[in-house]
Amino acid sequence: MVQQSDKKRILVVDDAPTTLEILRRNLTSQGYLVFTAPGVEEAIKILDSTPIDLVVTDLKMPKISGLDLIRHIRENFKDTEVMMITGYATVEGAVKAVKIGAEEYLPKPFTDEELFSAVKRALDKLKARKTGNGRVLPKSESFYGLLGQSGAMRKVYDAIAKVAPSNANVLITGESGTGKELVARAIHYSSKRSSAPFVPVNCGGIPEGLLESELFGYVKGAFTGAVETRAGFFQTADGGTIFLDEISETSLAMQVKLLRVLQDKEVCMVGANRSRPVEVRILAATNKDLLSLVKKGTFREDLYFRLNVITIAVPPLRERNSDILLLVNHFAKKFAKESDKPALRFSDKALEALKNYNWPGNVRELENIIQRIVVMSEGELIDVPDMPSLLRFSVMKETGFKRTLAEVETEHISNVLASVGGNKTRAAEILGIDRKTLREKLKHQKPNMGELL
């Protein structure tokens, strides 16, 4: 005898009660464990709470269509197959359903044999998909830590190659997470200064009161706590390169002192009576428009022109979409090795989800997401449901602002009741209403909520 836990679980979604009952009865007779839902919202609640092997859904339903449900399942439930049934059978509808992710498409009316055969094929495909292979990603080659073969990145490489041999100051611009420090390192290690120090300084991460002493150093007794003379970042970088990241975060007073260093090639330690010469190449970076800050009076124009001898603009990840697979491959291998896990494989749909995302956090965000996927993965094949929710389609997210206030209230009352096991007194307390008001609201809501009275 087949145990209840061994039965395949099928969820039937249709707004017609008669169809739901017929499908439930027929599929149950074949040994399946069958759940039913009259609409997409109810179906998603079941999917969120119960493992489902196959969803059999109608195409046309009120509020949210079966196509939206298919896409939601494909991007949120890795081990669930989908089959569509419809009384509005068209070639266009079938193509769209299959393209979104339905493995079977069954037009009404259909016989019991056609239904059973389609269900068996869908479940067989689910089994095959679980053991299927993912895409082998292209190998990655780095340029001093920079990855990418797109036209946008090749322009960056060309610019680095041209500026590296010179001593000119370079301003590196780009959004946060694009790799501006990597560009600075590539310039340094491609130059004749490569054997000398490369000193990165996050100007925005050092309190204003400490920035001067950190950059220029201080002599013993210069201030309380200065028990010894200490060299600053400029002296440490002597003969090499100093990288001033987030240069836009410096105060106008500090900008004056930086300008003096650029002009005189000397630094004056805090508490010292005379300056000391330094031979340092200065690279600066910003994620802001410095010229607009100059116009606002928050950044010195003379310092801007001193820094901006040559500009290298690092493109955001959304403008170098063809590099995403290379980056995914690189980070997946890196974190798999760190976690002592086998190399991951990505399904075509997972890679498509990664390529279609806008990446506001750029390469840094991609790196963090791949690390999370590697750490949390249970198998070697990564599919869309293994992705963070922000990379997946959600039908509830898409339709969340299209519901009436009454619908939102009904859902909230239902959720509160469920959370307290149907205890209406406790639910009324949580909702901030009395028990009588709750009873009145339940009377005017959906039949399934009325049953809670």
Image: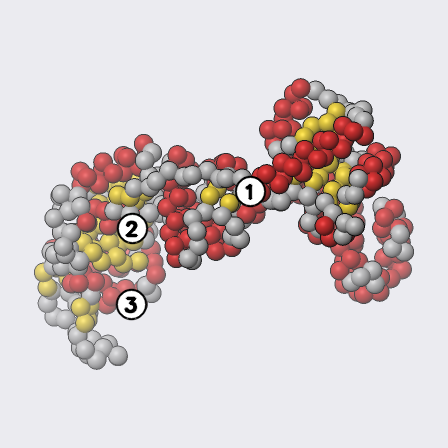
Position in image of residue 435 (x %, y %): 87, 62
Instruction: Indicate the amino acid at tag 3.
Output: Leu
C-alpha span from label 3 to label 1: 58 Å
Q: Secondary structure at mark 1?
A: loop
Q: Nearer the viewer, mark 2 or mark 3?
A: 2
Residue closest to the eye, 78 or 204: 78
Q: Position of residue 163 (x, y in %)?
A: 18, 41
The secondary element bearing badge 2 is classed as helix
Q: Secondary structure at mark 3?
A: helix
Q: Residue at x 17, y 38 (%)?
A: 162
Quadrant in which the C terminus is drawn: bottom right
Q: Disc 1 marks which amino acid?
A: Thr
**Along the viewing direction, whichever of 271 and 343 lies nearer the viewer:** 343
**Residue depicted at 84% across the width and 61% down the height:** 424
Q: Residues within 10 Å of mark 2 (few under 14, many from 20)?
A: many
Q: Is residue 231 above or below residue 138?
A: below
Decide: is 417 above or below 184: below
Residue under pointer 1: 131
User: Nearer the N terminus, badge 3 or badge 1?
Assistant: 1
2 and 3 marks in contact (CB < 8 Å): no
Q: Work out whether mark 2 precedes mark 3 in sequence or the reverse, and give the earlier one.
A: 2
The disc at residue 210 is 3
Q: Residues within 10 Å of mark 1 (few under 14, many from 20)?
A: few
Q: Which mark is residue 411?
A: none
Mark linked to residue 181: 2
